[in-house]
Amino acid sequence: MVSLNNKAVIPTKYELDSGFKFRCHPGISCFTRCCRNIEVLLTPYDVVRMKNRLGLSSTEFLARYTRYQEDEKTTHPLAFLKMNEDGERLCPFVDEKEGCRIYEDRPAACRYYPVGQATHRVAGEKPDEAVHDEFYVIVKEEHCRGFEEDRQWTIREWREDQEAARADEFNREWKNIMMKQNIPRDDEDRERRQKMFYLASYDLDAFRRFVLESRFLEIFDVAPEKHQKIRDDELELMYFAFDYIKYMLGIAQEVRLKPHVAEERRRAVEQVKAREEAERAARVAAASAEEEPKG
Ligand code: SF4
Ligand code: SF4
């Protein structure tokens, strides 16, 4: 998502059938003005589309075109499109005459613009069942002349026309994970979780190696027919990566340990607990012995 210029957001909640007037085209006087000095949050599916378009591995794409930022509230590790480091902070993919050089594979946030998509959690039917409600806003920036053009849309039509609805299908599960579970700042295992979250979200080529070339398949119960799919099909790999993130954050168990590994880990945890309990009892006994009156 483009992080929205809040001052330009019209304070109205738009639904799918809400209408707005807008047209953007190469002849317009503000052409490409919106492709500078912005923050574009990338989704895993965005990275797949863009790195394939550019013929790069995910690792190369992330290093060249993104910057890392930890979300302040949730501590999720996020990748943003890295703007050029000149005064204008131009997007590296913009050609001021031709427009977006990766137009067919542009990120979902760019597809939506000047519509902004928002999701918030609302109470579900059962007390522990939150539902994610999607709604939209219009971002009307001063420089954007598209609102003066005479073309009427509903949000639904705009999403279809820009293929944002299709991108949403691939992005929804990842967004749901983000809404469901933070990585708490005081989590002792936070750094490892952040590292794995980032790897599984964005660096799919490295995540594939992690699954297929480490001890992963000795530890996790992954059906043999799934190995080939993970190897050959990037979107299968992406959905598997989402399942892994859900396992790691304790949201769901579609990825699970092999039974003997789970049993070994359960025993190891019990042993640590028993040892800690014995040490605590010994300390208490030693302290009371010291306090006993002498003579
Ligand atoms: S009309 Fe708006 S969206 Fe289109 S190029 Fe101009 S500023 Fe960008
Ligand atoms: S990716 Fe394309 S549409 Fe998005 S900001 Fe860059 S040039 Fe503009």
Image: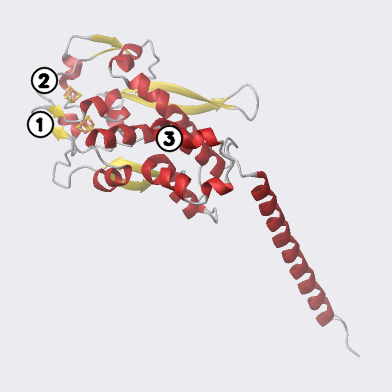
Name the amino acid type tagged 1: Glu
What's the amino acid at mark 2?
Ile
Going by the numbered disc 3, the residue's amino acid type is: Met
The quadrant holding residue 7 is top left
Residue 54 visible in the snapshot: yes
Q: Nearer the viewer, mark 3 or mark 2?
A: 3
Looking at the image, is 40 positioned above or below residue 27?
below
* Mark 2 C-beta closer than 8 Å to ligand 1: yes
Q: Quote the CA–CA distance across marks 3 and 2.
A: 38 Å
Q: From the viewer's perspective, is the residue at label 1 or at label 2 nearer?
A: 1
Asked whether 294 or 95 is in front, the reply is 95
| Residue under the image location 20 percent in, 17 percent down | 147
Relative horizontal placement of residue 183, taking residue 89 as reference (left or right): right
Query: Around disc 2, counting alpha carbons within 10 Å, would you say few (fewer than 14), some (14 to 19), or many (20 or more)?
Result: few
Q: Which residue is mark 3?
A: 238
The CA distance from mark 1 to mark 2 is: 12 Å
Q: Position of residue 265 (x, y in %)?
A: 66, 53
Q: Earlier in the sequence, mark 3 or mark 1?
A: 1
Residue closer to the observer: 214 or 60: 214
Could you say whether the residue bearing mark 1 is in a helix, strand or loop? loop
